[in-house]
Amino acid sequence: MSALHRSSATRFVKRYSALASLIVCLLPVSVSAQTNRFDESRLERIDEVLQGYVDRGELAGAVALVQQNGRTIYEHAVGWADKEAGREMTVDSMFRIASQTKALTSVLILQLMEEGKLNLSDPVSRFIPAYASTTVAMREGDEVTIVPAQRQITVQDLLTHSAGISYGTQPHIAELYRAQGLGPAAGNGWYTADKDEPVCTTMERLATLPFVSQPGAAWVYGYNTDVLGCIAERATGEPLDALISTRITEPLGMNDTHFFVPEDKRARVVTVYSSDANGQAVRAPEGAIGQGSYIDGPRRNFAGGAGLISTVGDYARFLEMIRRGGEAFGEKILSPRAVALMSTNQVGDLRGNNGRGFGLGFETTDRFGANGMESSGSFGWGGAYGSIYRIDPVANISILLMVNQLPLTNDIRIKYPTMVYQALE
């Protein structure tokens, strides 16, 4: 073959290879977009299902949101923000999001790790010396023995809820916690908005109480992320509300997310309801497990585990940042690898062999079918007042449902995600 022919052949091969590469690159995008399309008629079923809960009196009100690739696919407000006052629910209503706060505090801790201010393997005592020698209440039948912890609790133990720290409501420790203003004295344990003291003071007092499991031995849900909030304050010298605001909510444009509601926004806050013995929604009382102190409270105790108030729109912006690997709306909040750590099971089978694990702040779905119809690799959590959220990186969707009803005894948190997925082609 002549040099001219070889040159022509080489150019043809290069062009063909480039065209083939382009086709290969485009095909997954086309298939993904087609696979992930929502059936509009099936999405409309969600309206009827949500309204049914309100019509039957099982739910006072809710706001639901679905986004795909950052675009709103479904958004709907149903029922009442305050039924007695005749105030209807709106998409910008402000909800107590309780444990949905944990995700933001966990992101903050990962930010501090990326800045070299702490390590996941650091003992908590590096920041809160009172945690150098913690104890565990071991129970055998009616006998309770308080023993020293076998090792110190680490930052990663707190992020994964494997530190052995509960909310102090277990019968064998409840009275000890009540005496310190924690556990049963704080409603269902997690509530601290009424405390006229900094969160670090509360968390130092917690260290004097026995926990319910040895560090690393079990998955125990509790004050872990509130302790992380104190660690963030100690590592930076700044209060937690300022840290969350300047590092997460302000950059992401989450303008309606606060630990305590500003005066000019109080009319948008949703009333808390409860479920009576017949499953009917009834107005909750004042106090820690009712309306709380998020408007008129002391405004001194910033609970990293359960303290924020937000809207579906605001929280969707946070979820979009996570879904996109730590960067959204022109702001880089975390690195992709940090997000991967958060959304990958880090506790093995400590939560049981049920296909669900826990990462550094999120519950993980490790097997299709383990959590309804969501994809393996999905993750999320919820809040004590009834709200839930999920991120599905396969379908590129974020699912949000905000409710303020405690306890919430109906099955809306199961049915709503199902109704979203049945509309996905």
Image (cartoon, helix red, strand yellow):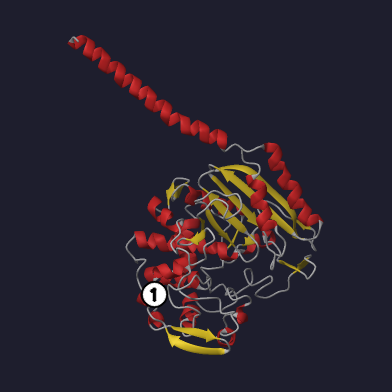
Q: Nearer the viewer, residue 334 or 132?
A: 132
Q: Specify the farthest residue to the left.
A: 3
Question: Residue 125: image x %, image y %?
Answer: 37, 77
Looking at the image, can residue 413 be seen?
A: yes
Residue 93 higher or lower than 74, as above or below: below
Which quadrant is home to the N terminus?
top left
Q: Amino acid at mark 1?
A: Val
| Mark 1 element type | helix
Question: Residue 166: image x %, image y %?
Answer: 53, 76
On the rendered structure, is 190 left or right of 123? Answer: right
* Residue pointed to by mark 1: 124
Q: Nearer the viewer, residue 293 or 415?
A: 415
Q: Residues within 10 Å of mark 1 (few under 14, many from 20)?
A: many
The structure residue drawn at horizontal position 64% and vertical position 51%, both measured from the top left corner, is 417
Q: Nearer the viewer, residue 44 or 303?
A: 44
Question: Residue 250: image x %, image y %?
Answer: 49, 55
The structure residue drawn at horizontal position 57% and vertical position 81%, both measured from the top left corner, is 182
Q: Nearer the viewer, residue 360 or 376?
A: 376
Residue 105 higher or lower than 8, as above or below: below
Q: Quadrant of residue 40?
A: top right
